Amino acid sequence: MYQNILKVGLPAWDENDQTLAKAVQKELGSKEEGMPTKLDTLGLPVKELVSGGSDDIGDVSWVVPTVTLRFPSNIPGLPGHHWSNAIAMATPIAHKGVTAGAKAEAMTIMDFLLQPELVDQAWDYFKNVQTQEETYKPMITKDDAPPIYLNSEIMNRFRPELEKFYYDETKYDTYLEQLGVTYPTVKKN
């Protein structure tokens, strides 16, 4: 996957992307570096996890070889789970990052489909290194039903309000256009 990331490269951030990124970083007191213009190098697996992000993979990575992809589609240097991280999600920053990440992911999938030895290598690493000394025991059994009833009343109440903000790609080129927002909108000093 890393080789494919190198082939795809970083998105071409334009002046508007950099202006928004630096303005948000400044607003939060982060280092004003804008969007990354150089790819990071691939690091070695860590022996002991200290902290990290979250994902939707859940139990999957404990039963099959799994790789995760992190491609810049948000403004760096911001605190996680914060309003400032939500800003980029409706901008070209997110679209460019997700598109570049999807290309690297698609190329990696093609590698596995066209080179079956990579699948064998992944399983070998998974069985003989990654899970050799640890056995995973899921907290949820195959008989546990998801408790979707817990939020049904809330979702039924708020869904009509949320639907007003669903992106309509048949009428607008971007979500920002639908919202009537000029990109980038930043505070003037």
Image (tube, rainbow, N blue to C red):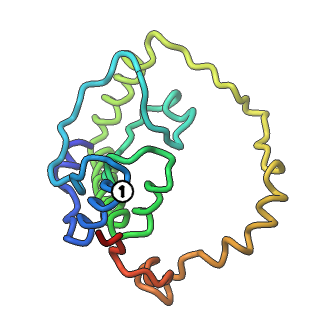
In the rendered image of this protein, does residue 97 appear above or below residue 166?
A: above
- Tell me the crowding category of disc 1: few under 14, some 14 to 19, or many 20 or more residues within 10 angstroms, Cα based: few
Q: Is residue 53 above or below residue 24?
A: above
Q: Residue furthest top?
A: 133
Q: Amino acid at mark 1?
A: Glu
Q: Position of residue 117 (x, y in %)?
A: 28, 35
In the rendered view, tell whether residue 160 sits above or below residue 11: below
* Residue at image mark 1: 27
Residue at the front extreme of this rendering? 189
Q: Residue 75: x, y in percent?
A: 33, 55
- Give the x, y percent position of residue 189: 29, 69
Q: How many marks?
A: 1
Q: Which residue is pictured at 25% across the width and 47% down the height?
A: 31
Looking at the image, residue 135 lies above or below residue 81:
above
Q: Residue at x 59, y 75 (%)?
A: 166
Give coordinates of residue 140: x percent, y percent: 71, 29
Q: Does residue 144 appear left or right of residue 88 in this picture?
A: right
Work out whether residue 131 or residue 182 is closer to the camera in this orientation and state it.
182
Describe the element under mark 1 as helix, strand or loop: helix
- Which quadrant is home to the N terminus? top left
